[in-house]
Image (cartoon, coloured by chain):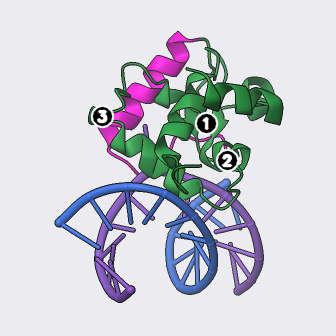
Chain colours: A green, B purple, C blue
Amino acid sequence: MDTNTPGFFEQVYKVVRCIPPGKVSSYGRIAAMLGYPRAARAVGYALSALRQPNQEGYTSANVPWQRVVNSQGRISIRHREQTANKQAEILRAEGVAVDGNGRIDLAVHLWEGLHLVELDDILRGD
DNA sequence: ATGGTGACTCGCG
DNA sequence: GCGCGAGCCACCA
């Protein structure tokens, strides 16, 4: 296409937006859906950048960043404690069972994700 | 173009 | 189950 990197971040945001309330996904799974199974860090970086408004218009207000946790089903305490705490709070409000250690049962709340056809439609549309 | 950074993951002990 | 080290990727200065 016109660019070899059609905004990896933007793609991440679009996919995350598709995660329904009560479900969660992991950084690695999001990356894998986009075709980069090893780009988990980039996904996390994309969400961190979400704290600030982008030119694209993606913000923490219109992207359900809280529905993305690590592969272990635990809220990443890597980032600021305050943010992690708020993340657990929001998830509980959405119906996701989060225990005291910030752990989530992926067997129950894991979002299966998009199929390639759906993904293509999402990335093109909007 | 090079190097540093980060809300990740996996493999070991 | 936990902590540590190494690998991977995209973004910014």
Q: Nearer the viewer, mark 2 or mark 3?
A: 3
Q: Residue at x 40, y 36 (%)?
A: A84
Q: Are marks 2 and 3 on the same chain?
A: yes
Q: Is residue A102 visible?
A: no
Q: Residue at x 47, y 44 (%)?
A: A9
Disc 3 secondary structure class: loop
Q: Is residue A55 visible?
A: yes
Local crowd size for mark 2, using a 10 Å CA cut-off: few (<14), some (14–19), many (≥20)? few
Q: Check the image and report above or below for A56 versus A125.
A: below
Of the pair A51 and A73, the residue shown nearer to us: A51
Badge 3 amino acid: Gln
Disc 2 secondary structure class: loop
Give residue A24's position: percent from left, percent from top.
64, 28
Magenta highlight range: A71-94
Disc number for residue A72: 2
Badge 1 amino acid: Arg
Q: Are marks 1 and 3 on the same chain?
A: yes
Disc number for residue A55: 3
Between discs 2 and 3, the one toward the N terminus = 3
Location of mark 1 (residue): A103
Give residue A102's position: percent from left, percent from top.
54, 35
